[in-house]
């Protein structure tokens, strides 16, 4: 049970990083990269 929760959290974390990398790589301003761009 706990292992499955940790695994899901890891997959969610990897998915979030993947979206941020994809948006920054393709130059797309998404909901995750826009706040970072405006903050810099």
Image (cartoon, rainbow, N blue to C red):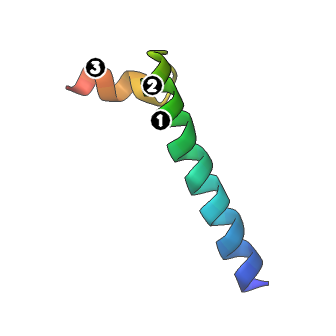
Are circles 2 and 3 on residues that touch, CB within 8 Å?
no
Rendered image quadrant of residue 38:
top left
Q: Would you place residue 34 above or below residue 21 in this image?
A: above
Secondary structure found at label 1: helix
Indicate the quadrant containing the C terminus: top left, top right, bottom left or bottom right: top left
Q: In this view, does 19 lie to the left or right of 25?
A: right
Disc 3: CA contacts within 10 A as few (<14), some (14-19) or many (>=20) = few
- Determine the CA span between mark 1 and mark 3: 17 Å
* Mark identifier at residue 21: 1
Residue 6 lies left or right of residue 26; in this view the side is right
Q: Tell me the residue at 76%/76% (across/down).
A: 4
List the residue tagged with mark 2. Answer: 25
Look at mark 3 in the image and give the residue it sits on.
38
Q: Which one is in front in this view, the residue at disc 2 or the one at disc 3?
A: 2
Q: Do the residues labelled 2 and 1 touch (CB within 8 Å)?
A: yes
Q: Where is residue 16 in the image (x, y as percent from the top left)?
A: 56, 44
Indicate the quadrant where residue 8 lies: bottom right
Asked if 33 appears above or below 10 in the picture, the reply is above
29 horizontally vs 4: left or right:
left
Q: Which of marks 2 and 3 is nearer the N terminus?
A: 2
The mark closer to the camera, 1 or 3, is 1
At horizontal 64% and vertical 54% (from top left) the residue drawn is 12
Quadrant (top left/top right/bottom left/bottom right) for the N terminus: bottom right
- Specify whether 34 is left or right of 17: left
């Amino acid at each position: 049970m706990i292992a499955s929760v940790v695994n899901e959290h890891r997959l969610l974390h990897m998915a979030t990083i993947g979206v941020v990398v994809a948006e920054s790589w393709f130059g797309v301003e998404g909901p995750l990269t826009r706040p970072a761009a405006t903050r810099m």
